[in-house]
Image (cartoon, coloured by chain):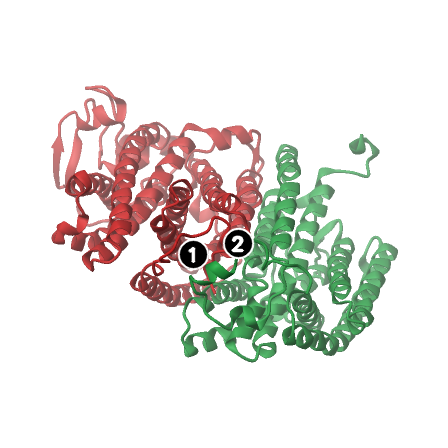
């Protein structure tokens, strides 16, 4: 039915699905990045730092899978896009991979040994790796939409330096500031006591630089999009909504409605990714070389059978994944505080900690 | 120019070998240990005996330390196809991308989400629900093996596709997922994973048995590990036998190289020990000790069955694919095959000896020599896993996809030697550091031993502390 109208095709559906996967990645892993950047600064001693990290430790790995699935889906649905993008952004992706490795190991290994030097080292590596990953993703996406030099076979002809242009660096800084703010608000929702207060204050302070960067980056983007995007009005509207959602975070956080402020930054990140993907559509890599066409979903897609098979699999699994990831958020809803980590766990706690669920009281 | 291109190609191949072998040090431990820990926790759930709880939590910690490295090195694997092998990705993406995407969607989400729930859910979830978490992790890790092995089986024996212009298109996902090679590939790998985890549990248990601590706990763990090793080695050997028969049909060159069989023979002898001239593609063997009829019997299940030789296959491939060298490096394929098979049988022998030593409730610590040897045995499964993959991947050369695409035509054409060199050096360096860090953490966790005896009955609704603080 939809196919017959001509407004719907599998290529567009998969472009949409990949956009959704990136939205999920940036909203969820976005606050992981923010927590990773902020925890050594907001936590004044080891117990506080563990409480802050404890907000993401049970869930971060599940969020990183959004990236893996986005990558896998791109490979499966648009091999030409995957091949050009991953080989083109070679050294940038190498740096992203190194930071992702360091980040993952830091989150998992930091608390497995209590030595002071050991923890201090991870407390430096984790923020640096988190910040670098967020920044580099911003750089990568800015380049995808802004255009990169391609040859006739769709292969990238620049180098790492070409990717680090002014616009892309602005994009990187915007993403970095946005996820830091997002992470601060997440911590304000997931912690209590002094930590909650400090996280909220940090969010209020971070809001202004994040807003300036976001407006500057989206302004530059819209100036660009007005000339290059096939659907400039819709793109500009989405960008405007992004700014509004981000703006709403400040008054909400100010009035201590941190849950709503966090919702606002989540929506803003979602809309931000949506803006970039809508601007891009139906292209997947914009060519800045005169005479060389951009790569589009139609020139890079897999065959029809592949897309149909993948669609069935996605329809079966994605709702289930969303359901159990939502359940995991529910299970770990309790706010964490310094006192939860101040004393090492003792088997005798068992006697004082029954019945089950008493500790898991929601909403402090 | 040709030299530089071939250097970039070689560096990309080295990078794939280094990152994959490294990744696969952790993967079998993850898969195998997930089943072990799930089994231990189930024993606690059923029996209510505290030692099973302490066993679960002790081995669970080792499992977690290992899991982290499997995860972070896995991301490199997925990105690497696009980064270093973009021509390959373009050529086979329609077929090869699907299992990778499904692996993420159906398996990685499952294992990562439920592992978080398992580690940190001890005081948040009801006991039965919490037990289900580790089973879901085990299912997730095993499912991920299934999908990625389907992709690899397709590289060994492409099915369910058609060639359109300069790329392959998927026509049947069922064939990709259920071809006979894939089914043997999967059970062989899962068997090897359980074997690997079995040797780890055995060595760790032996360490504490020798120190006389928690005898009851570690006797049980050691005995269980030995039974798993026995079962897993039998599975690996039997499945491996049928897998080799399938390979003889589907990748005759690989199996001919594995046996250093140069001329098509009827009957074909089984080579036990062969040495050839020191060359990349020696055209004969100098020494070859054989069992007459052996290979015919194994490969074709008949006394006088015909087995094709390297020279005839090479001639046939030349006629079919054009001039070129279609033999892999014989010496590597021959010896990696023997290392893998040899360790498989050695594992079987070790498990039988170990089970004999522990018969009728005897403690393994009674054999001071055997318990000490378990530390050395721990190297065996890792050697066998690595040899197995080297055999599988190098035996397919010069093809990246058997009969369809040559490795040298699959590499990213635009990558400079410097770029690939930098990434290879970078990954090798960080992997080396992480190997040290992980080994240190594991040894520390082993030496710390299980948690203290609780010394009282654990209430049914008690909130146990999470595994990591």
Query: SS at mark 1?
Result: helix
Q: Check the picture and name the quadrant holding the N terminus of chain B.
A: bottom left
Q: Nearer the viewer, residue A253 or B155?
A: A253
Color of chain B here?
A: red
Other residues around mark 2 within 10 Å, as few (<14) / some (14–19) / many (≥20): many
Q: Quadrant of residue B389?
A: top left
Identify the chain drawn in green: A
Give the residue number, with chain letter if any, for mark 2: B121
The Cα–Cα distance between marks 2 and 1, rounded to whole angstroms, is 14 Å
Q: Nearer the viewer, residue A235 or A154?
A: A235
Res. A112 in view:
yes
Q: Nearer the viewer, mark 2 or mark 1?
A: 2
The reply to whether the C-beta atoms of the residues labelled 2 and 1 are less than 8 Å apart is: no
Other residues around mark 1 within 10 Å, as few (<14) / some (14–19) / many (≥20): many
* Residue B26 position in % (x across, y down): 38, 53
Residue at 22 percent across and 43 percent down: it is B343
Res. B465 in view:
no
Figure label count: 2
Q: Quadrant of residue B2?
A: bottom left
Q: Which mark is residue B227?
A: none
* Residue B150 position in % (x across, y down): 47, 37
Tell me if A77 is positioned left or right of B177 in this view.
Answer: right
Give the residue number, with chain letter if any, for mark 1: B64
Tell me if B273 is positioned left or right of B42 in this view.
Answer: left
* Residue A76 position in % (x across, y down): 59, 43
């Amino acid at each position: 039915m939809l196919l017959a109208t001509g407004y719907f095709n599998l290529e567009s559906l998969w472009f949409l699905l990949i956009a959704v996967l990136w939205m999920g990645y940036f909203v969820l892993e976005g606050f992981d990045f923010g927590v990773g950047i902020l925890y050594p600064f907001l936590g004044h001693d080891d117990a506080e730092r563990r409480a802050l990290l404890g907000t993401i430790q049970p869930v971060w790995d599940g969020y990183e899978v959004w990236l893996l699935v986005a990558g896998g889906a791109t490979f499966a649905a648009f091999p030409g896009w995957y091949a050009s993008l991953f080989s083109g952004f070679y050294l940038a992706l190498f740096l992203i991979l190194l930071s992702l490795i360091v980040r993952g190991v830091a989150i998992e290994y930091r608390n497995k040994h209590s030595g002071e030097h050991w923890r201090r080292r991870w407390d430096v590596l984790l923020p640096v790796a988190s910040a670098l990953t967020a920044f580099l993703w911003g750089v990568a996406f800015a380049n995808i939409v802004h255009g990169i030099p391609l040859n006739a076979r769709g292969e990238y002809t620049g180098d790492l330096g070409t990717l680090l242009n002014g616009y892309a660096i602005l994009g990187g800084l915007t993403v970095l500031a946005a996820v830091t703010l997002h992470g601060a608000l997440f911590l304000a929702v997931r912690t209590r006591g002094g930590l909650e207060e400090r996280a909220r204050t940090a969010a209020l302070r971070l809001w202004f630089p994040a807003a300036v960067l976001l407006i500057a980056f989206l302004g530059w983007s819209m100036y660009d999009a007005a000339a290059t995007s096939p659907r400039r009005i819709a793109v500009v509207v989405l960008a405007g909504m992004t700014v509004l959602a981000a703006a709403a975070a400040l008054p909400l956080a100010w009035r201590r409605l941190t849950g709503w402020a966090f919702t606002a930054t989540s929506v803003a990140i979602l809309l931000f990714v949506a803006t970039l993907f809508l601007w891009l559509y139906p292209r997947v890599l914009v060519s800045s070389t005169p005479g060389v066409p951009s790569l589009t979903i139609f020139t890079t897609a897999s065959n029809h059978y592949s897309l149909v098979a993948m669609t069935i699999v996605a329809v079966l699994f994605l709702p289930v994944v969303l359901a159990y990831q939502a359940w995991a958020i529910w299970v770990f809803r309790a706010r964490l505080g310094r006192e939860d980590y101040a004393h090492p766990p003792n088997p005798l706690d068992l006697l004082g900690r029954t019945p089950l669920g008493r500790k898991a009281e929601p909403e402090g | 120019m040709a030299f530089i291109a071939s250097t970039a190609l070689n560096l990309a191949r080295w990078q794939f070998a280094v990152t994959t072998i490294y990744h696969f040090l952790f993967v079998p431990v993850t898969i195998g240990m997930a089943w072990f820990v799930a089994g231990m926790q189930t024993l606690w759930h059923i029996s209510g005996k505290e030692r099973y709880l302490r066993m679960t939590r002790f081995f669970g910690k080792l499992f977690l330390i290992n899991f982290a490295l499997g995860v972070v090195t896995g991301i490199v694997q997925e990105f690497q196809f696009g980064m270093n092998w973009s021509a390959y990705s373009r050529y086979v993406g329609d077929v090869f991308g699907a299992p990778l995407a499904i692996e993420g969607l159906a398996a990685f989400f499952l294992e990562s989400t439920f592992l978080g729930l398992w580690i940190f859910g001890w005081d948040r979830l009801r006991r039965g629900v919490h037990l289900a978490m580790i089973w879901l992790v085990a299912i997730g890790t095993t499912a991920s093996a299934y999908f990625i092995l389907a992709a690899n089986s397709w590289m060994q024996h492409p099915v369910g596709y058609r060639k359109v212009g300069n790329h392959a298109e998927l026509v049947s996902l069922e064939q990709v997922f259920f071809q006979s090679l894939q089914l043997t590939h999967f059970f062989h790998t899962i068997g090897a994973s359980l074997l690997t985890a079995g040797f780890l549990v055995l060595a760790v248990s032996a360490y504490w048995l020798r120190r006389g601590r928690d005898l009851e706990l570690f006797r049980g763990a050691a005995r269980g590990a030995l039974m798993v090793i026995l079962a897993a080695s039998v599975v690996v050997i039997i499945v491996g036998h049928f897998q080799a028969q399938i390979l003889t049909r589907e990748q005759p060159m690989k199996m001919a190289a594995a046996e250093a069989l140069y001329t098509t023979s009827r009957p074909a002898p089984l080579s036990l020990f062969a040495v050839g001239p020191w060359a990349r593609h020696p055209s004969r063997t100098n020494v070859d000790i054989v069992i007459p009829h052996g290979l015919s019997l194994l490969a074709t299940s008949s006394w006088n069955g015909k087995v094709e030789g390297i020279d005839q296959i090479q001639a046939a491939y030349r006629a079919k694919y054009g001039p070129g060298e279609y033999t892999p490096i014989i010496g590597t394929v021959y010896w990696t095959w023997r290392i893998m098979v040899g360790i498989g049988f050695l594992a079987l022998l070790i498990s039988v000896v170990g089970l004999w030593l522990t018969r009728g409730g005897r403690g393994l610590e009674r054999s001071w020599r055997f318990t000490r040897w378990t530390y050395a045995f721990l190297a065996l499964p890792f050697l066998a896993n690595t040899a197995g993959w080297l055999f599988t991947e190098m035996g397919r050369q010069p093809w990246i996809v058997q009969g369809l695409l040559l490795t040298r035509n699959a590499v990213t054409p635009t990558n400079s030697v410097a770029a690939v060199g930098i990434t290879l050096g970078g990954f090798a360096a960080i992997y080396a550091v992480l190997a040290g860090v992980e080994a240190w953490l594991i040894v520390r966790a082993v030496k710390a031993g299980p948690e203290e005896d609780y010394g009282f009955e654990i209430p049914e609704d008690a909130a146990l502390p999470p595994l990591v603080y």
